[in-house]
């Protein structure tokens, strides 16, 4: 609740700065950040309204009891028989937002929640949370840093388990199962286990499949799990036996791209400058067409959140922001290489969460 | 793909009947039903457009390769550097929907996807999928029935495991773990395990907690898991030792409410008539204020989907619809009782998926 009071005050300050009359959040990550909980999300409209002075909850009656202990914000419950319209009007009035003209919508809420709300506020224009909740969530406090660090440490151990288990004849899904077991043993709930061997590594979002590792396979291992409410995300490369023809040169290019991005990431720099630093190294080496995604994404309660490190993002990096740096080169039919660090931006540059080197791990060596 | 062709044809027929120029689906259950897959959902706009003659996909470039094998629909990829605007315009043109005036939006898509699309179609009015995809999904074919039946059978076995494991001193979470293990052994991924003993049973959405069962606890066990792409959902009541004072009379009321709803559910009847049948029995017995939720919900790819059996729903029940019948009475501080069946509506009435009786299970008896 102490965090909630602090975060609500910071949100109201942002609302004043941006001329926002109402912030409406669905039962998701933004609400989790602000209140430390969110009701069960389903098809029943459930919205938190933050007005200029007061907050109010549009709350499905079925969830009211379960949520009551978690917050002091007034509930406006509605039953399945009544439907949400009357409670919606009452909640907006309670939040002092009946005449709101500038409304910030949680961009992740369901389309029907958003359009129902906008129909109840025909005079209102809308924006998403970029300049309010989103801007605040990008900068992590030390509590969040500690949780992210603990989660990253679990991911390091799961990656080391993967390195130990990798051998010819094992399938991608079997390696993924080892990784998930390593996470589970540490109290972390697996979120994704991308294991791409050989040509599969050239698809950036390939999940683990039935393919079995062969001598000479380069393997992309990109894994994450949730622990203490916060996710991890790390990518390392391993090889079964001897790396394929040309592998080491390309790995070195990706490594230089990571280092260039780390060197470029400083408070006050636009996010696109970090992308440009990584992309420049790869383009100069002749692989520009094979780096098909952005350089990074923020990480917090969500595994993907602002800031996004794209070639066009003007978002100014600030101290306390946490994001990935993960350039890659994907050569169709041959192999893919991605190296990913999660960092927190300090005054003098990025601090890396992981303790693992980014070198190619040679299995069985 | 055969299912897709049939379902697309049925959707186009609904579009003609409703004067719909464009159906836009996000990467979720509606798309899963139509195409048999959906791309990874994240913050990158990804939409399937179904126009009068053609379909087109607005597709994040990162997901294009992974989705290519799953469909022949033309992709309009966009990269993180470009952003989605140009690809969105091209996809709308490809679907013949640039001038669409009546647009159906997947109500579950993210608010930012929906508002971005509506801004690209300023001349368009919108509706949600109720009369198109939603109406079609309510009626299950025999393939879907078979998958739901297999899933329900797994839930019956998990419930029987719960009955065997229940004893004084065991905690709600420990019983939930038994249930999840029983699901996992059958290849079913647990979705929820509501285990509410004693007073906890009086909160309809209570999850399993640390409370340990005591002699005389009535226990609500409401569980579901996903198997073969389809969920299960069943609620039964158990008691540790002798049931609490007054329990058996209230159980009998809920049982009569289930039977009244089963008798009322016939093709051609509005959904609210089924709710009224169950609610009438409970009100007549003097417990009307303690039945705080709707009588049922549809079940298909989603665990909660149309039709909803509320006191106001005019939705006409049809042969092939699958839904829950789950009246309950919740007496604060004493106990809660809910009995839930999933049924498919046949020409002559509902066919129940579960083979378990709805009697009170007495643990250790």
Image (spheres, coloured by chain):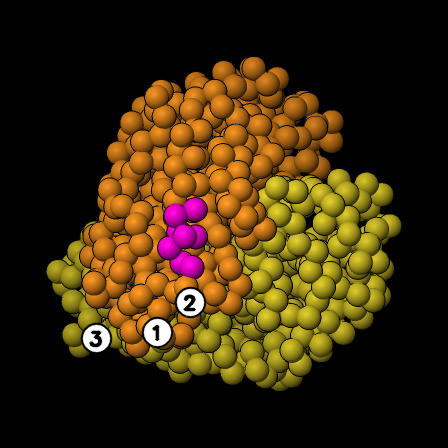
Chain colours: A orange, B yellow
Residue A249: in magenta span: yes
B267 vs A160, nearest the viewer: A160
Query: Which residue is at the front of the view, A230 or B71?
Result: B71
Q: Quadrant of residue B313?
A: bottom right
Residue drawn at 64 percent across, 70 percent down: B71
Q: Residue at x 80, y 70 (%)?
A: B13
Chain of the residue that carries numbered disc 3 in the rendered image: B
- Disc marking residue A214: 1
Q: Is disc 2 placed on a helix, strand or loop?
A: helix
Q: From the viewer's perspective, is residue B135 above or below residue B335?
A: below
Q: Is B17 left or right of B58, judged from the image as shown? A: right
Q: Is residue B172 left or right of residue B250?
A: left
Q: Nearer the viewer, residue B65 or A42?
A: B65
Label 2 in the same subunit as label 1: yes
Question: CB atoms at circles 2 and 1 under 8 Å apart?
Answer: yes
Q: Determine whether, in the image, residue B293 is placed left or right of residue A339.
A: right
Question: Which chain's residue wears label 1?
Answer: A
Q: Main secondary structure of the magenta part?
A: helix
Instruction: Give percent across and percent down for residue B323.
Output: 54, 69
> Is the residue under label 3 in contact with that under label 1 (CB below 8 Å)?
no
Q: Which residue is mark 3?
A: B164
> Where does residue B249 sit, x and y in percent of width and height?
34, 66
Start-end of magenta stretch: A246-253
Please state, as top left, top right, bottom left or bottom right, where the C terminus of chain B lies in the image: bottom left
Locate residue B113, reporting x and y percent: 64, 46
Q: Chain of mark 2?
A: A
* Magenta-span inclusion, residue A152: no
Callout 3 and callout 2 share a chain: no
Location of residue B210 in the rendering, given as x and y in whole percent from the top left corner: 21, 52
Q: Residues within 10 Å of mark 2 (few under 14, many from 20)?
A: many
- SS type, badge 1: loop
Q: Which residue is mark 2?
A: A198
């Amino acid at each position: 609740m102490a965090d909630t009071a602090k975060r609500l005050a910071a949100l109201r300050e942002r609302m004043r700065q941006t001329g926002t009359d109402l912030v409406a959040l669905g039962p998701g990550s933004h609400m989790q950040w602000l209140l430390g909980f969110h009701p069960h999300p389903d098809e029943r409209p459930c919205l938190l309204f933050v007005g200029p002075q007061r907050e109010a909850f549009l709350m499905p009656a079925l969830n009211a009891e379960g949520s009551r202990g978690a917050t002091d914000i007034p509930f406006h419950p509605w039953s399945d028989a009544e439907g949400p319209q009357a409670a919606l009007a009452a909640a907006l009035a309670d939040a002092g937002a009946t005449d709101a003209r500038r409304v910030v919508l949680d961009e992740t809420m369901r389309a029907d929640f958003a359009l129902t709300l906008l129909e109840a506020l025909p005079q209102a224009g809308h924006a998403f949370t970029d300049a309010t909740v989103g801007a605040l969530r990008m900068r992590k406090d030390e509590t969040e840093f500690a949780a992210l660090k603990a989660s990253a440490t679990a991911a390091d151990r799961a990656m080391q388990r993967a390195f130990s288990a990798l051998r010819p004849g094992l399938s991608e899904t079997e390696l993924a199962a080892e990784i998930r077991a390593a996470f589970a043993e540490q109290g972390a709930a697996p979120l994704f286990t991308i294991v791409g061997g050989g040509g599969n590594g050239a698809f950036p979002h390939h999940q683990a499949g039935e393919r079995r590792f062969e001598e000479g396979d380069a393997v992309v291992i990109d894994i994450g799990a949730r622990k203490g409410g916060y996710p991890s995300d790390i990518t390392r490369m391993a090889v079964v036996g001897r790396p394929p023809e040309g592998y080491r040169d390309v790995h070195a290019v990706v490594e230089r791209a990571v280092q260039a991005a780390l060197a470029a990431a400083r408070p006050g720099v636009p996010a696109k400058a970090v992308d440009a630093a990584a992309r420049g190294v790869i383009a100069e080496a002749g692989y520009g067409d094979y780096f098909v995604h952005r350089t990074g994404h923020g990480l917090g309660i969500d595994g993907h959140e602002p800031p996004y490190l794209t070639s066009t993002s003007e978002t100014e990096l600030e101290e306390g922001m946490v994001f990935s740096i993960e350039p890659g080169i994907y050569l169709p039919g041959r192999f893919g290489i991605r190296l990913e660090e999660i960092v927190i931006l300090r005054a003098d540059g990025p601090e890396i969460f992981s303790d693992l080197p980014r070198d190619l791990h040679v299995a069985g060596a």
